[in-house]
Image (spheres, rainbow, N blue to C red):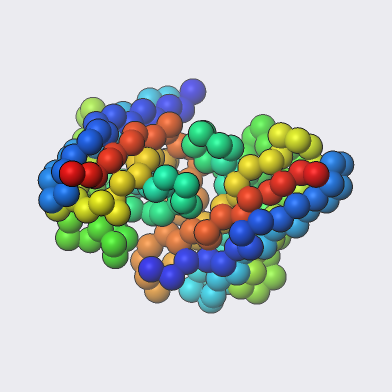
Amino acid sequence: EVQLVESGGGLVQPGGSLRLSCEASGFTFSDHYVDWVRQAPGKGLEWVGRSRNKANSYSTEYAASVKGRFTVSRDDSMHSLYLQMNSLKTEDTAVYYCARTTPSNFFDYWGRGTLVTVSS
Amino acid sequence: QAGLTQPPSVSGGLRQTATLTCTGNNNNVGNQGAAWLQQHQGHPPQLLSFRNNNRPSGISERFSASRSGNTASLTITGLQPEDEADYYCSAWDSSLTAVVFGGGTKLTVL
């Protein structure tokens, strides 16, 4: 059974940093792209960033709203995806999901999410 | 980043049919096709269809998707109370090199 479990969310002050983790199981993690998607309270889904697989040089992509502040990385040996978030803003407050992605760019499995609250 | 356009709300009667739309452009829906996601309150999204009308295993045949030009559609037949949810479309935008989402449509079953 494919599972994705996010962790690391919490309360952080504006300007602060936080690192999220997503642990995967039930599939060959190294074969897949994995993305971060967020959802602000009461709002829609917003794509955050992507880590492609080893076959695609672990290349990354980012949404314009987070580029330069967030970094996506992965450790295939740990079956894990990470999101390092720096210079956090109040508008980064959201539930952050990791999602398994196919090369056709659709999200076929999602974690349950972890809540990040940026507030003073 | 520019997103896809979805109507904020759609409603349909019990056992009737509802059609949700998602409009993009030649760089996303018109080029790559769209995926549809269903999200019930307090739960993560779930993939309903991809590449316009492929359903993952376990998804009811009552959900069918199509595309015409830059507009993708999701048709839900035989509406059930459990179909009340938010529905999102998504696509890869080759110009933005980013995933774009629609703003979501809230489906109400009357």
Name the spot of residue A16 as percent of width and height, x first: 13, 45
Dividing the picture into quadrants, the one containing residue A32 is top left
**Residue farthest toward the right in the current orientation of the protein:** B15
Judged left or right of residue A85, residue A56 is right
**Residue at 41% from the left image edge and 54% from the top image edge:** A46
Name the spot of residue A115 as percent of width and height, x first: 33, 36
Image vertical order of residue B88 relative to residue B32, above or below: above
Image vertical order of residue A113 relative to residue B7, above or below: above
**Residue at 16% from the left image edge and 49% from the top image edge:** A14
Name the spot of residue A73 as percent of width and height, x first: 21, 44
Q: Nearer the viewer, residue A82 or A52?
A: A82
Name the spot of residue A87 as percent of width and height, x first: 14, 53
**Residue at 42% from the left image edge and 33% from the top image edge:** A111
Q: Is residue A76 visible?
A: no
**Residue farthest toward the bottom in the current orientation of the protein:** B26
Image vertical order of residue A62 relative to residue A26, above or below: below
Q: Nearer the viewer, residue A89 or A120?
A: A120
Quadrant housing the C terminus of chain A = top left
**Residue at 43% from the left image edge and 70% from the top image edge:** B2
Judged left or right of residue B75, residue B96 is left
